[in-house]
Amino acid sequence: MPLIPEDVLEQIRLRADIVEVVQSYVPTLKKMGMTWKACCPFHHEKTPSFTVNAGRQIFKCFGCGKGGNVFNFVMEMEQLGFADAAELLAKRFGVYIPDPVPGQFAGKKNESFPGQVIYGSRERLCTLHEKIAEFYRRNLLEHPDSPVAAYFKTRGLPDDIAARFMIGAAPDAWDSAIQFAHKNGFIDDELRTSGIVSSKEDGSNHIYDRFRNRLVFPIWNEQGRIVGFSARSIEKDPKGWKYVNSPESPIFRKGRLLYALNFARTSIPKANAVILCEGQLDTIAWHRAGLTHAVAPQGTAFTAEQAMILKRHTQNVVLALDNDSAGHEAVFKDAAILLPLGFNLKVALYQGAKDADETLAKFGAEALEKTAAEAVDFFEFALTCASQKYDVSVPSGKSAAANDVVRWILQLDNEITRDFYIDWLANKLSVSIDSIRSVVQRRSLGGDRFQAQLVRQEATPGPALKKPDKSMDKALAVLLQLVCCSKEFAEAASRDLPPGSLGSSPVAKSVEYMIQTAMNDEWDGKCDGIFNRLNQTGEDVSELAELLSAPLMPLGCAGQDGQPASPQENTPEYEAWLASLDDFRRSSYNSCLRSILNHYLMQERARLIDKAKNPDVPQEERNAAVLRITGISKELLSLSEKYPVK
Ligand SMILES: [Zn+2]
């Protein structure tokens, strides 16, 4: 990828407001005081540690450590490289990247912007999909006698819905999409990358239309760009695949897409829930019935990545899968992903029909409304399934059913909810709470996957932790200068720093030494005494020596010869200078404390996560560790308030 011109990047940066961009992905982002906060879209958490600073146009998650500017956010969110993220932002904020693209897609004019050549392949791929979607749509409308149009009529979809979902028809031909794309200035390489064509496997480089004589559903990404297609066979019992989907491409990643989320994203907060169903036709049926908060995974099983996408919109999921044994199995598969991530789950049960599409056709929109309204609690559903498997009127059946349901109770990410369901289950099976507790105990000691799964999620990356932390070294160096230049700071540090938070480097030991002298009322601003101690243990003191031989007043305000550039004493200027120096030092102190405590708490958190995961540790202690992890997340979040930096 060639470099994007500096001034173009600057224009994108100026126009792409980070709050607006983050909010388009994380609608729960709310202003709290000076900063914007939300639960982090990159890791699982219950209390928000993801912050956006509008003034500085940066984001930072104090939970997983991710942070940066608007470009970093889009790169992380869309899993893109820098150039692609810039391109996406450029398009969205109306900045044209003027240079032609060298390489495979070079020199092709983009129809959307006559006279302009758009940078990079991603934008062209989206545009290609959007043009082809219009082409399929026109083909359906303009050929009402075609077999696809005839099949489409049998589905009974109203015009407005068909238009909204841009349902189209792929012609019964091998090259109609290819010809259309060529006419619009797209080249074969682009068609191959997009997956709109298939290549012959005989090495001849020959391509042909992937979708032929099928009903075509465009697939949008969350931002409302068309990135793929799903094409349904029009035969009742097709010889080939019932659905042919776009293959994975740079813009189409099935595991990260939810069908109709672009439409549902405004309805989900209003409904305070999302309906998760199977496939396009069910989703469309829900939307037709006015329940526009329905989405579906795209041509694949539901993934944890998709769950994290939903998490940005709501905590409440109604599983509305097919009313058959495969559908019920899918409920449990999805629950295994959703429960540990803290979702509240309900299960919608279609009455007298297999799915939403059939329910709507047979009984109308009201029946679907009723299905959603009467969705049962997931645990109710799990117990009903268990009761069908075992005879719960006899003790052995009760025990087997309890075992089945406890498995799901263990996936819950919240102690109180877990206790609630333990009571509930005991009550339902008419057994004592203690007996359910003992099942819980046994199953969790038996290495149930729950704990590991929960913790794996809690543990989502702390990349800053793994690298040696430069900011920690710098903070310690500045803190040492501060505790040497004023007893007040040494005393403050003794209050603010928990034992063990400084680490064990020579600089850390020197800071501790200064704190000690202050507490013993022996502070004299000199820390040469520390060398004797360090020399005894044979530590490398060269770095410390270098640090301490620098003037102890620099901190950005040293003048010539390392001496502070102070105005003449006993003048108003001198007083003002002293005051500003004081402010500056206090701010430096806060900044050090933030870095040090952040580092320390992140390490504590990692240690506790290991402990909570360890099956050799007694369950009680593991539970305590999980609670402490939550406490630490809060502490991490409060650091910037507690230690403000100017
Ligand atoms: Zn995070």
Image (spheres, rainbow, N blue to C red):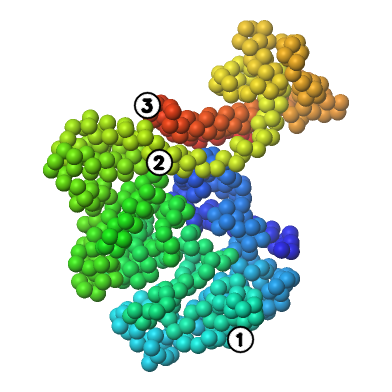
Report the amino acid beneath label 3.
Glu
Report the amino acid beneath label 1.
Lys
- Secondary element under disc 1, as helix, strand or loop, is helix
Q: Position of residue 22 (x, y in %)?
A: 52, 53
Marks 3/2: CA distance?
Answer: 17 Å
Pointer 3: residues within 10 angstroms few (<14), some, or many (20+)? few
Left or right of 363? Residue 181 is right
Q: Position of residue 389 (x, y in %)?
A: 21, 50
Q: Nearer the viewer, mark 3 or mark 2?
A: 2
- Secondary element under disc 2, as helix, strand or loop, is helix
Rendered image: mark on residue 183: 1
Examine the image and state in which quarter residue 17 appears: bottom right
Q: Nearer the viewer, mark 2 or mark 1?
A: 2
Cβ of mark 3 under 8 Å from ligand 1: the answer is no
Q: Position of residue 374 (x, y in %)?
A: 21, 57
Report the residue marked by disc 2. Answer: 449
Of mark 2 and mark 1, the one earlier in the sequence is 1
Examine the image and state in which quarter residue 411 appears: top left
Residue occupying the point 28% across, 34% down = 439
Above or below — where is 60 with respect to 90? above
Task: Give the camera-side residue of 282 and 263.
Answer: 282
